[in-house]
Image (cartoon, grey):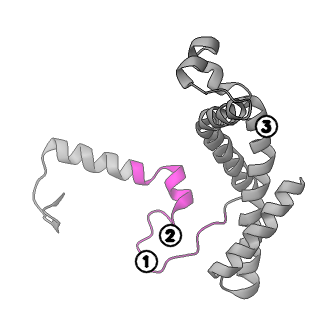
């Protein structure tokens, strides 16, 4: 058992043994083994380099993150657009009035178009950024802030073109 931050060679209670076993099982899960920098069960202190994440995973998580972000931002964007349109027409915008007239879910009107935009734009923007950043790191051996800004501008422009 591991008690009081010191290794004590005494008998453990049953709950401590179960907890220790569960922690070991968790640490031996396939996901954590994939993410580990050293092989599971390795007692050596030398760390190996982590496995590279497949490009498909990078692009998929980029797109998923963009879609989830848009799902959160879309209602606020809808309210802002409707406010601007009302002010251009000389009307006073009221969120309460909008909800009474169109319902609460009206803030999600048009969300499908925004999600489809993020499927293509966020996936390509973030995925290409990760890819180009890794390529630059292999070429130069380092990636400073200015280089990341330039890569971000280039990949953002490429994604906008797509």
**Whether label 1 touches label 2, CB < 8 Å:** yes
Quadrant, the N terminus: bottom left
| Disc sitting over residue 116 in the figure | 3
Asked whether 44 falls inside the magenta stretch, the response is: yes
Position of 125 compared to 144: left or right?
Answer: right
N-terminal label among 1 and 2:
2
Instruction: Say few, some or many: other residues with alpha carbon within 10 Å of mark 2 (under 14 / 14 to 19 / 20 or more).
Output: some
Q: Residue at point 61% right, 43% down?
A: 69
Q: Tell me which secondary structure the magenta stretch mostly adopts.
A: loop
Residue 32 place in picture, x, y as percent: 49, 55
Q: Which residues are magenta?
A: 26-52
- For discs 1 and 2, the disc positioned in front in the rendered view: 2
Q: Nearer the viewer, residue 92 or 129?
A: 92
Residue ID for mark 1? 44
Instruction: Say few, some or many: other residues with alpha carbon within 10 Å of mark 1 (under 14 / 14 to 19 / 20 or more).
Output: few
Q: Residue at point 40% right, 72% down?
A: 43
Residue ID for mark 2? 38
Residue 154 drawn above or below residue 29 = below
Residue 55 drawn above or below residue 119 = below
- For discs 3 and 1, the disc positioned in front in the rendered view: 3
């Amino acid at each position: 058992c591991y008690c009081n931050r010191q290794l004590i060679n005494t008998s453990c209670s049953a709950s401590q043994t179960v907890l220790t076993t569960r922690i070991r099982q968790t640490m031996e899960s396939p996901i954590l083994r994939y993410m580990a920098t050293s092989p599971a069960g390795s007692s050596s202190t030398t760390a190996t380099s982590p496995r590279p994440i497949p490009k498909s995973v990078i692009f998929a998580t980029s797109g998923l993150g963009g879609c989830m972000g848009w799902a959160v931002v879309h209602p606020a964007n809808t309210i802002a657009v409707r406010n601007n349109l009302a002010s251009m027409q000389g009307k006073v915008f009221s969120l309460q009035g909008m909800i009474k007239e169109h319902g609460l879910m009206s803030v999600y009107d048009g969300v499908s178009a925004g999600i489809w935009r993020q499927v293509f734009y966020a996936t390509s923007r973030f995925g290409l950024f990760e890819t180009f950043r890794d390529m630059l790191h292999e070429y130069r051996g380092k990636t400073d802030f200015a280089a990341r800004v330039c890569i971000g501008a280039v990949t953002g422009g490429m994604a906008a073109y797509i």
